[in-house]
Every structure is written in structure tokens, then in C-alpha cells.
Image (cartoon, grey):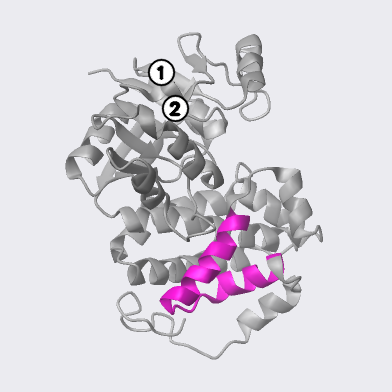
């Protein structure tokens, strides 16, 4: 069964999914707000800035008109989280209830601290929502490298539908009902990856990275569970899986920005040099959300201090190391709001 699919966003991941789905035989239309970007892609046959060296099939259509979502089977939001609400509000009149919306953005809305599925449900309430997350660098998806992801939805049938329509011999999609867990894991791993990059930039080694990732997933889990997520989700693809790939790869903009910060570049300048760094904005949202939920997230708190209060990186790491002694597992930490 083939589907008529619109991909909103012609950046790296949006294009990667478009290429992947086109290779599966689906009919694909890609929307971009920027007509010049569309012209450049048509002329060059690739997006030289976002996905260099990856040829885009002629069978993929491009448009600057949001009306392209009308009567589509699936609409994929592949745009930065800061623009999801505005694009959704503008496109909402063209949607009908038969369309399944898939969001791939990993982050929290700065003003409201809401997850992207909540934002989309507010703006386009007539449609069913699916979250697509997991360890999936655009560069590798576009080249057809074996990749696994998770389709999560409150509607089991919708998650299974996306699982069926997007699975292939190089892409394996699992389904889940834990939307909260998948979104919190996908969003907050960017914060930890930014910290991982900072440690790399300072010249720290594997011991430091392993500790950061392990304790990072610990505090991500604590926040997610407090919000209603399932504990086991954070041991899966959208938890530790996504955290591993983002903390260890140079494909990760969060890690690359962190490296610059660790080398002494000011946080705002590092973000400017790298481009879209979701972890920078998510750190502030996660910090506020942790306070709202009454959850201790020491790594996130130190990251917030470094990014927004001119905190000293080396001192912040030292302060994490000399915190009060704890039992590692802190019995029932996934069920109780204990000190981390």
C-alpha cells in the first residue's frame, strides 16, 4: 500500500525522510517556507547546506504552499521545534480528519514547556498524532543505512499504520503507546549531548562521557516518569538509544556546539556557528520543567548555569563530582521523587 505524503521542512531530516519514503514508492511532496531554497534544490539536485552530497530524486515534488497538506494521507512535521506552532496554525485550515500527523521535532516549546504533540493537538485538533523518534541521523537515513525508530501514539492503530507505511529493509519502526516517554527522551537527550560535547571540548575522556550518559539518562527518566511516562521507554530506542547516538557522533549539532563551548567559545556564539542547536533552547525549558515538577536534575541545572548565567564549566563539573554521596540505584528511583 502506497501513501500520499507531505513533508513540512526541507532541512536535513525532512529531506532524509522524503528520500527514504520516495525509495519505498510513496508519493512525496516537500514544503519549504523559503522559495530560494527550493530553487537551489531543484537546480543542484541536493541541499548543499543541510544534506550535501545526497542526491534528491526527481520524483519528489517541492512547493512553498502550505495548502499541499490538503487531502494527504500523512503529513510529517520536520521543522525546528521553535516553528512548529506557527506553521501548524497556518496549515490547520487545510487539514482534514483523515490525515495522520507525524512529528519528528525533538524539543519543548519555550513559552509553554509543552511537548510537540501537545502543541500540534492544540493547533490541529481534527487529526490523529504520531511521534517519530529514535537514533536516526539524517545523513545516515538519507544514505539508506540500517536505522531503527519508534512510532508512538495514544491511538494504537495510528502508530501501527505509520509503522507499516515507513518500515522497509533498511528502516525498522517499532510502535509504542508511550508518547510522553518518547518525547521527553528525544528532547532531553539533546541537553545531555550538549554537555557531552562540552566535556569533549575540554579534553575529558571516555570515563567522563560514560558517567555523563549514564547519569543523564537517570535524570531524564526521573522527569519523564514524574510526567506520566513509562520507565521502560528510557531503556529503549527513544531513551538510551537516542542518547548514545547524539552524544557520540559528529553528525550531532548539539555535540558539536558543546565542543566549541568546552574549548572556550561563548554559548551564543557556538550556537550561531553551528546553526540549529535544539539542546541549547531545550536546556532552559527542561530546567523550568524540572522545577515545575519538583525533580532534581543536577546535570541539567549545571548546563543551564553555564549556558545562561555565564557559569564556569570546570567549576560546574567539580560541583557535580562533590555532591553528597548517594547509593547508585536509589531504590525505586523510577517510581519515587527522590533526590538524584
Specify whether 335 is left or right of 215: left
**What secondary structure predominates along the stretch shown in magenta?**
helix
Q: Residues within 10 Å of mark 2 (few under 14, many from 20)?
A: many
Residue 195 disc label: none
| Picture layout, residue 296 above or below residue 94 | below
Between the residue at mark 2 and the residue at mark 1, the CA separation in whole angstroms equals 7 Å
**Residue 334 on image: x %, y %:** 33, 74
- Classify 249 as above or below 10: below
- Whichever of labels 2 and 1 marks the residue nearer the N terminus, that label is 2
Residue 312: quadrant of the picture: bottom right
Residue drawn at 28 percent across, 63 percent down: 230
Q: Position of residue 112 (x, y in %)?
A: 48, 60
- Could you tell whether 80 is left or right of 173 in the image? right
Residue found farthest to the front: 93
Spot occupied by residue 193 in the image (x, y as percentages of width and height): 58, 57
* SS at badge 1: strand
Q: Which residues are magenta?
A: 279-307
Quadrant position of the N terminus in the picture: top left
Query: Taking the image as drawn, is residue 170 in sight?
Result: no
Q: Is residue 97 magenta?
A: no
Which residue corresponds to the image point at 48% horizontal and 69% vertical from the top-left?
Answer: 289
Q: Are marks 2 and 1 in contact (CB under 8 Å)?
A: yes
Residue identified by numbered label 2: 7
Residue behind mark 1: 28
Amino acid at each position: 500500500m502506497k501513501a500520499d505524503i507531505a513533508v513540512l521542512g526541507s532541512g536535513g531530516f525532512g529531506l532524509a525522510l522524503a528520500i527514504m519514503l520516495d525509495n519505498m514508492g510513496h508519493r512525496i511532496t516537500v514544503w519549504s517556507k523559503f522559495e530560494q531554497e527550493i530553487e537551489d534544490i531543484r537546480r543542484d539536485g541536493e541541499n548543499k547546506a543541510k544534506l550535501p552530497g545526497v542526491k534528491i530524486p526527481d520524483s519528489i515534488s517541492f512547493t512553498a504552499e502550505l495548502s499541499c497538506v490538503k487531502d494527504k494521507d500523512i503529513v510529517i512535521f520536520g521543522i525546528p521545534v521553535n516553528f512548529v506552532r506557527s506553521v501548524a496554525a497556518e496549515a490547520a485550515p487545510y487539514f482534514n480528519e483523515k490525515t495522520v500527523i507525524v512529528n519528528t521535532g525533538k524539543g519543548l516549546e519555550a513559552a509553554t514547556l509543552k511537548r510537540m504533540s501537545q502543541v500540534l493537538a492544540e493547533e490541529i485538533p481534527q487529526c490523529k498524532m504520531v511521534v517519530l523518534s529514535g537514533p536516526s541521523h539524517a545523513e545516515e537515513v538519507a544514505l539508506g543505512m540500517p536505522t531503527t525508530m519508534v512510532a508512538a501514539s495514544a491511538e494504537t492503530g495510528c502508530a501501527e499504520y505509520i509503522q507499516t507505511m515507513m518500515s522497509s529493509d533498511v528502516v525498522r519502526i517499532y510502535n509504542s503507546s508511550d508518547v510522553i516517554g518518547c518525547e521527553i527522551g528525544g528532547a532531553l537527550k539533546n541537553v545531555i549531548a550538549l554537555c557531552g560535547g562540552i566535556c569533549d571540548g575540554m579534553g575529558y575522556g571516555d570515563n567522563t562521557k560514560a558517567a555523563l550518559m549514564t547519569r543523564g539518562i537517570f535524570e531524564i527518566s526521573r522527569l519523564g516518569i514524574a510526567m506520566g511516562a513509562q520507565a521502560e521507554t528510557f531503556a529503549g530506542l527513544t531513551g538510551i538509544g537516542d542518547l548514545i547516538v547524539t552524544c557520540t557522533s559528529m553528525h550531532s549539532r548539539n555535540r558539536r556546539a558543546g565542543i566549541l563551548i568546552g574549548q572556550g567559545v561563548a554559548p551564543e556564539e557556538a550556537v550561531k556557528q553551528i546553526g540549529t542547536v535544539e539542546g541549547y533552547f531545550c536546556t532552559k525549558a527542561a530546567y523550568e520543567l524540572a522545577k515545575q515538577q519538583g525533580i532534581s536534575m543536577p546535570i541539567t541545572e549545571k548546563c543551564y548555569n553555564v549556558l545562561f548565567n555565564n557559569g564556569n564549566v570546570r567549576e560546574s563539573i567539580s560541583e557535580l563530582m562533590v555532591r553528597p554521596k548517594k547509593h547508585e540505584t536509589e531504590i525505586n528511583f523510577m517510581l519515587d521523587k527522590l533526590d538524584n
